[in-house]
Amino acid sequence: MKSGSIYLDNCVTSPMAPEVLDAMMPYFTERFWFPGSFYSTGESTNDALSGFTHIIAEAIGASDAEIHFTSGGTLANNIAIKGLAASAKKGHVICSVVDYPDLLTNAAWLEKQGFEVSYLPADREARIDLNALRQAIRPDTFLFMTTVVNHVVGTIQPLKEIHEILKAADHKIYFHADAGQAFGKMPLQVDDYGIDTMSISAHKIHGPQGIGALYQRKGVRLGQTIHGIKRADNLQTGGLSIALIAGFAKAVELNFADLPGSIRQLRELSDYLYARLQEKIDYIELNGATGEERAPHNINVSIDYIEGESITMMLDMHGITVATGSACASQGLKASYVLMAIGKNHVQSHGSMKFTISRYTTREQLDFTVDKLAEITKELRARSPLFNAMKNQEK
Amino acid sequence: MQYSQKVLDHFMHPHNVGKMENPDAVATEGSPSCGDQVTVYLKIDKDSQVIEDISFLSYGCASNIATASIITDLAKGKSLEEAKKITYADAMEALDGLPPVKVHCSVLAADTLQTAISNYEIEHGLKEVPNFGKDTILAELKKIIYPQVGQDIVTLKMVKYVGFSDGEVLIDLNMLSFDSWRDNVVEEIHEHLEKYPEVKKIKVNLP
């Protein structure tokens, strides 16, 4: 089987849907104009842009004017967080130790600028500690931010409860949501949770890479942090790729035409995957929440006594792409900070494997993956001093 | 990770892998917390002092398994004196090189072999248990690889001062404040020195 023929790392990026490419093509070729130009061609692009914006806004229950296009989730997170901080000028921010690096690196930057940040702890399933949130709120807290679906273990944060707590504070606390992993994987209407700003991106739901959006609730003021030629609005300086936006809208259309159906399909596949893993491999443990509190596309397991880079490389030789939380496979040789923060030990982190599926994943692919993984596990455990020591103790 | 074909071959089909029953010497180095651990077993002919058989177990990444495999190949059939000269550089050369961040794996494999030989020699009265001191600390620091370039921190002159008194190890390191490998190096220093019962406390000073 050729490399990458079974792709189970969809949380990083996902293959583009063929319909998306078709939807983009005309805007790359004959209808390439920037929106906003005064001449008639620019006008027609404007009309197209309005239509696409509406599709994306509707998916999260926003109005069209609340959507700003960005190059992806990271830029959206930066514009929102830095923008809210610029408006507040000083004060206190709350996030958590299990957040996505976009939020944590922004938090670290804010600290350097003189803001104060509280990092909430999380429970063993990576759910943030709500009592700690209640206690962390101060008179000068102006921002709470969270990663709606945890990027490592797929746990969905308790948005309703968070919303209640923020609402009960005696002053306004802005709620920024990083929805990179959540968008298209769960019902996420911004009004349901009082979300003020939110980042989403296209390429995680089979749209093109290089396009995302920032939701900004009407009335929420974001200080301008990116300066340049104004083509759409102050937040969205520079030119927009109408082709990428067309692709984004098509990807949203495909994903949201039947959202409950999309979610059900993913959940059935990941339930199937986890059941097969449990059946074929012993000494295995699920990381993260179960059932409805887990995003439907993520299965993260720790395979005891063996190390993830070895597993990943062996799977790769069978054309299977899966991610690991092992330090050996990371650039900085560090164990997954999320798994360590939720009380897993080093062996569980080094032996963690993250499968993220998509609507293009089939049961046959999952069967093949689990069969190969079971063989690999057996082989690597035979080589492992930890496994041999454990077997000796059992005797 | 860009591995040579030799590394991939030894990773996929390691030589001399598996637990040995009734070995003459055994050593385990590394720790699961750092993501790599190697055990080496030796069968030694008493008269000729030749390593008749050798095997290993490895918990770790591909390069960990491959370097342990090649170390056993290099040592098999050698006399103890010859085997004592095998270094991590020999293992790397035999594998057509390793990425800089993976050089520490070859150090671990070579180290485990040397510890197994040393254990055998001590047990058979061929040498005395060495006294712990500054030299031991320096020898351990020479096993710590700076991942950015794949050379040890002593050779790279990152170790400015080493002291040892009353069970306390004091090390001054010369690493820039924004060096992203600082945590890794400090963690490795602890891992390498904590295994000695003589060490009660480790203090690493960084600028």
Image: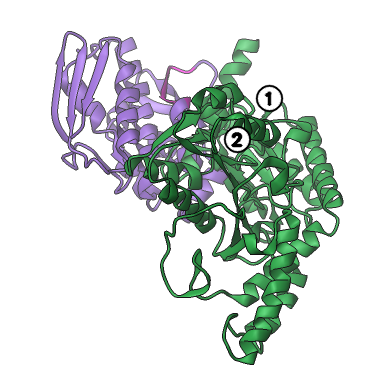
Chain colours: A green, B purple
Residue at the spot x=60%, y=17% of the render?
A390
- Assign a secondary structure to mark 1: loop
Query: Label 1 sits on what residue type?
Result: Tyr
Which of the chains bears the disc numbered 2? Answer: A
- Assign a secondary structure to mark 2: strand
Marks 2, 1 in one chain? yes
Q: Is residue B18 in view from this perspective?
A: no
Residue at the spot x=75%, y=57% of the render?
A59
Quadrant hosting residue A267: top right
Position in image of residue A372 (x %, y %): 72, 44
- Mark 1 surroundings within 10 Å by alpha-carbon count, few (fewer than 14), some (14 through 19), many (20 or more): few
Query: Label 2 sits on what residue type?
Result: Ser
State the predominant SS element of the stretch in magenta: strand
| Residue that carries the numbered disc 2 in the rendered image | A352
Instruction: Report, in whole angstroms, how far the alpha carbon at label 2 lies from the one at label 1.
Output: 12 Å
Name the foreground residue: A96 vs A393: A96
Nearest to viewer (mark 2 / mark 1): 2
| Residue that carries the numbered disc 1 in the rendered image | A283
Q: Which quarter of the rendering shows the N terminus of chain A?
A: bottom right
Residue at the spot x=48%, y=18% of the render?
B23
Quadrant hosting residue B202: top left
Residues shaded magenta:
B23-32
Instruction: Specify whether B183 is left or right of A228.
Output: left
On screen, residue B141 above or below A27: above
Name the foreground residue: A185 vs B164: A185
Instruction: Specify whether A94 is left or right of B154.
Output: right
Indicate yes or no whether the magenta region holds residue B30.
yes
Instruction: Specify whether A365 is left or right of A288.
Output: right
